[in-house]
Image (cartoon, rainbow, N blue to C red):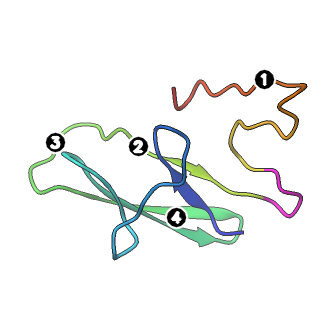
């Protein structure tokens, strides 16, 4: 299953027409599946200096489980997401 970028709210990120996730003031990211790995491309804005915020990437397996922190059983397990929050 193809990986995807999630925004700070844990939702699937909106990409631009070229498939990049744009972070204003920093640059843009594009991810590409590479077997079990994911290649990440970051293109900084022209005058960006410093450390970028980074991105969170999710993937879902054939059983419907993802690499995020959402539980399949919300009535029995609380969702915990300390990375995005």
Q: Secondary structure at mark 4?
A: strand
The quadrant in which residue 49 appears is: top left
Instruction: Give the mark toward the camera: 2 or 1.
Output: 1
Look at mark 2 in the image and give the residue it sits on. 54
Label whose residue precedes the other's in the sequence (2 or 1): 2
Q: Check disc 3 and report its element: helix, strand or loop.
A: loop
Q: Is residue 63 magenta?
A: yes
Q: Looking at the image, is mark 1 or mark 3 nearer the viewer?
A: 1
Q: Foreground: 41 or 6?
A: 6
Q: Is residue 54 inside the magenta stretch? A: no
Q: Which residue is mark 1?
A: 78
Residue 43, picture quadrant:
bottom left
* Residue 55 located left or right of residue 66: left
Q: Which residue is mark 4?
A: 39
Q: Residue at x 28, y 37 (%)?
A: 51
> Residue lying furthest front in this view?
75
Do callouts 2 and 1 mark residues in contact (Cβ within 8 Å)? no
Work out whether 80 lies above or below 45: above
Residue range (magenta): 61-65
CA distance for labels 2 and 1? 26 Å
Of badges 4 and 1, the one in the foreground is: 1
């Amino acid at each position: 299953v193809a990986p995807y970028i999630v925004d700070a709210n844990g939702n699937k990120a909106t990409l631009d027409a070229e498939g990049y996730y744009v972070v204003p003031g920093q640059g843009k990211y594009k991810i590409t599946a590479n077997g079990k790995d994911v290649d990440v491309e970051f293109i900084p804005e022209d005058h960006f200096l410093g450390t970028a915020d980074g991105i969170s990437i999710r993937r879902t397996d054939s059983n419907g489980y993802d690499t995020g922190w959402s539980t399949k059983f919300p009535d029995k397990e609380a969702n915990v997401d300390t990375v995005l929050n």
